[in-house]
Amino acid sequence: MFAKIRWRKAKFYLCSIVASMLATPGVADSNGMRVEQVKTAFVLNIARFVEWPSVANQPKPSSQLAICLQHANPMFESMLAISGETISERPITINPISHFNNLTTCQIVLIAESELTKFQAEVATELNQPILTILDMTESNQANSARSNILVTLVRKGARIGFEINLEKARGVNLRLSSELLKLATIVKEGG
């Protein structure tokens, strides 16, 4: 058991380091798809360190883990590459959505910065479901970007990509985040 935890921890650190190195401006700007692949690796690794309640959208631990995003999201094509990967014995499915107002079949929702206004308009009330919402703000220089209903924000940290977590909100929707994940994140609160 401990060896498995240590391997997962080492694997996450290794993937984070490799992803950060690949995200340098010279490399990232030469191939836009590579940046999206790096962000996809972040999403995959973050999801590996999240525990959903067993009574969540999927009652069986072995059921699918649905990642929902709009087809116009720049990460859509790179996310398709991880379809079928498994997290805690749950196969990942990539589900295209056209609106954010019905997320009941999603465990993870990816939101591009350009979709944030639409997301906030369509999800006008608090999300009280165990849905991991991830906002991609890597094209912006905004830090401490905690927003309503956003649990994780991918951000640019100089030439690297990092992430912020609204831990209070995650706990409020009954998602358990690994302490190993929290060590790598910047913890933010609602309202900055």
Image (cartoon, rainbow, N blue to C red):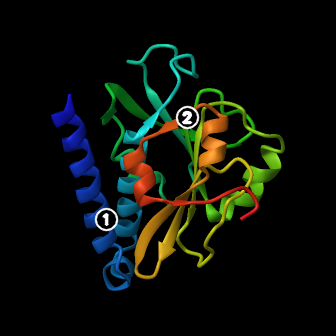
Q: Is residue 44 placed above or below 58 in the rendered structure?
A: below
In front of the other: 72 or 169:
169
Which quarter of the figure has residue 136? bottom right
In the rendered structure, which amino acid carries the disc numbered 1? Ala
Q: Classify 10 Å Cα crowding around label 2: few (below 14), some (14-19), many (20 and above).
A: many
Q: Position of residue 183 (x, y in %)?
A: 41, 56
Residue at the spot of label 2: 175
What residue occupies the far top of the structure in this picture? 60
Q: Is residue 151 placed above or below 188 in the rendered structure?
A: above
Q: Quadrant of the C terminus?
A: bottom right
Q: Position of residue 150 (x, y in %)?
A: 65, 51
Residue 44: which disc? none
In the rendered structure, which amino acid carries the disc numbered 2? Leu
- At x 36% / y 77%, what residue is drawn? 28
Which quarter of the figure has residue 143? bottom right
In front of the other: 115 or 20:
20
Which quarter of the figure has residue 23? bottom left
Mark 1 or 2: the one toward you: 2
Q: Secondary structure at mark 1?
A: helix
In the image, taking residue 185 as reference, residue 190 lies left or right, namely: right
- At x 36% / y 28%, what residue is drawn? 91
| CA–CA distance in space, label 1 to label 2 | 25 Å
Q: Secondary structure at mark 2?
A: loop
Q: Quadrant of the N terminus?
A: top left
In front of the other: 84 or 152:
152
Residue at the spot of label 1: 19
Q: Position of residue 160 (x, y in %)?
A: 40, 75
